[in-house]
Image (cartoon, rainbow, N blue to C red):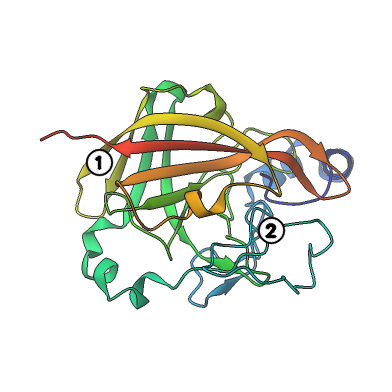
Amino acid sequence: MRIRTHSREVAAAVLAAAILVGGTAAVRTLLVLPASALLVPYPTEAHEKNDAFGLIRFVTETATPFSGAQGASRAERPFRARPAASERNGASEAMGTAQPMRLQIPHIRVDAPVVRVGINGVGNMATPSSFSEVGWYRHGPRPGEPGSAVLAGHVDNALGFPGVFKRLGELREGDVLYITVADGTALRFVVASVETHPYNDAPTNEIFSTGGAPRVTLITCAGSWLRSAGTYDTRLVVTAYLADDK
């Protein structure tokens, strides 16, 4: 998943212009600025501006045709978001210390901060504004709670530099990852599956499930870049279950 939807060719042109106009200092400035600097990283409203990989219309008990202005012609499955955590009997909100703060995946050398993300204006999951951060879907389960805690990260940025989940596809069954929550507890999860799905046909009922064993679902983009759609053609989905360390 990219932070921006324009092509690598445009990014290369921007980089070349920076070199011509301002030299290497301008290039350094360009590279350190967040790719989505104008987006709100900690939104307080349900709708956020940063699109999450055009992934999905979220899970609903009864699917109805989607009438949003963007992406309606791309045969995306019609889902809408589940209720926010605060609406589910207040159970998640009472567990304030369970909010994820950091994700570590030793096998692929990931050690990244976790930020809260919600839903954008067209009903998709939002993504972090920085390609070095991981976004946790705040309307779903928290890590360690029953159900699937969804974490999304970028595979690269608009200039082609690797994102936090660039090597996610290297994970295999049995690999471990750790999520540190707000009270300092590190929860250990064990990878159970690594799957790929078409970008417009991911198993959303499973990914955003609020029932079943505690698990985390890691999502990023994969495959080939579709210029016409402004996204990659595949979604990589890694599922890891909470380990019994008692």
The disc labelled 2 sits on which kind of residue?
Arg
Give the residue displayed 48% in from the left and 67% down from the top.
Answer: 42
Residue drawn at point x = 79 percent, y = 62 percent: 71
Circle 2: element type: loop
Residue drawn at (52%, 78%) of the image: 45
Residue 142 image offset from top left, x and y in percent: 33, 56
Which quarter of the picture shows residue 222?
A: top right
Q: Mark 2 to mark 1: distance in Å?
A: 33 Å
Q: State the SS at label 1.
A: strand
- At label 1, the amino acid type is Leu
Q: Visible in this render: residue 19? A: no
Residue 203, compared with residue 88, is above or below; it is above
Circle 1 sits on which residue? 187
| Residue at the left extreme of this rendering | 246
For residue 137, side relative to residue 215 (left or right):
right
**Residue 195: x percent and y percent?**
56, 32
Q: Position of residue 5 (x, y in %)?
A: 78, 51
The residue that label 2 is drawn on is 77
Say whether residue 52 is left or right of residue 21. left
Left or right: residue 240 compared with residue 24: left
Q: Is residue 158 above or below residue 145?
A: above
The answer to the question of whether label 2 and label 1 lie on touching residues, with beta carbons closer than 8 A, is: no
